[in-house]
Amino acid sequence: MEDYINKISSASEYILSKIDSVPEVCIVLGSGLAPLASMCDVISSVPYGDIPGFPVSTAPGHEGRLIYGVLEGKKVFMMSGRFHYYEGYDLKDVTLYVRVMARLGVKTLVLTNAAGGILDGMKPASLMIIKDHLSFFAESVLRGANLDEFGVRFPDQTHVYDPEYIDILDRAALRLGINVRTGVYAYSKGPQYETPAEIRALKMMGAGAVGMSTVPEAIVASHCGMRVAAVSCISNLAAGISPNKLTCEEVIENAGKASADNCALIKEFVKSI
Ligand code: HPA
């Protein structure tokens, strides 16, 4: 545990040495959100490999850079590339960056991802604002000794996704004329996609979309007292709903099609908070 706290400290000190003031917001660029990096005035950009203790991202389309810049007149961090449990990392490493952001004093975490759509009538390349999640079938990211300096042993999960942020995202989408749904994101550890039976079960439990990221990060962020906003790009219809076999190519293609709306929504959100 001491090693882990040391990793958080060394990573935060390194990042502090590269910036002149700490942004309020960190945006995680999930699939399809990479173009947001070029819409920001980049002040500096550091490969994850240079940050002490940071894992290196291996997922396709996840570049692996921490960007520091200005978006909509506000200083931001952007994580271009994130870490997934399915890549083989320990959940503590998957979420190390979140604790580093909390240690630095970042107040808001914006999580984006690609997900399989479950809600009736959902269309590929559309967006869903995450209002809650299902994750009780996966190991908790908070298992093990509690990091008391970050948060309490038994954190409340009533509002992991900040209600005011959900509202801001909703109104931002309306202003921009982007059609969004709001729903529950079901966390699946991956890397295999779900079976049709699993999707039917998730649907009965109230899931609107399913994906392999976001939840461990959101839990850690809320444990640290950060405010979380999260948006899924519906990159495919979930298994059994889609008439086709699921492929990574389809996910990347539809995440690309939704990219303009997705970037516009996140920009408008940053402007509005
Ligand atoms: N399932 C899980 N993760 C995903 C999916 C899916 O259908 N699409 C994109 N990420």
Image (cartoon, rainbow, N blue to C red):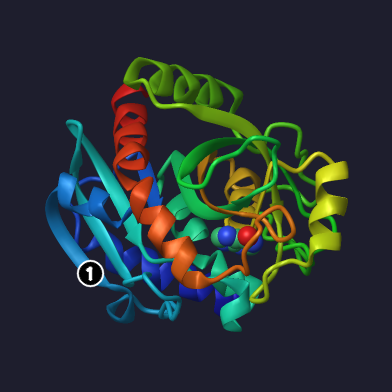
81 in relation to 171, above or below? below
From the image, tell me which residue sits under label 1: 46
Q: Is 76 situated left or right of 60 in this image?
A: left
User: The residue under label 1 is which amino acid type?
Assistant: Val
- The residue drawn where x is 20% and y is 32% is 72
Look at the numbered disc 1 and give the secondary structure of its residue: strand
Q: Residue furthest front?
A: 243
Q: Position of residue 1 (x, y in %)?
A: 65, 76
Mark 1 and ligand 1: say if the CB distance to the nearest ligand atom is below 8 Å. Answer: no
Regarding residue 150, the answer to whether it shows in the image is: no
Q: Position of residue 49 (x, y in %)?
A: 32, 81
Figure disc tally: 1
Which residue: 17% across, 45% down? Answer: 39
Decide if residue 193 is in sight here: yes
79 relative position to 222: left or right = left
Residue 174 in the image: x percent, y percent? 42, 17
Quarter of the picture for ligand 1? Answer: bottom right
Q: Quadrant of residue 172?
A: top left
Observer-nearest of 76 and 15: 76
Q: Is residue 93 left or right of 108 when viewed as pictured?
A: right
Comparing 72 with 233, the one in front is 233
Q: Residue at x 31, y 53 (%)?
A: 78
As drawn, 140 above or below 10: above
Q: Residue 263, relative to residue 239: is it above or below? A: above
Residue nearer the viewer, 10 or 216: 216
- Badge 1 crowding class, 10 Å Cα cut-off, few under 14, some 14 to 19, many 20 or more, is some
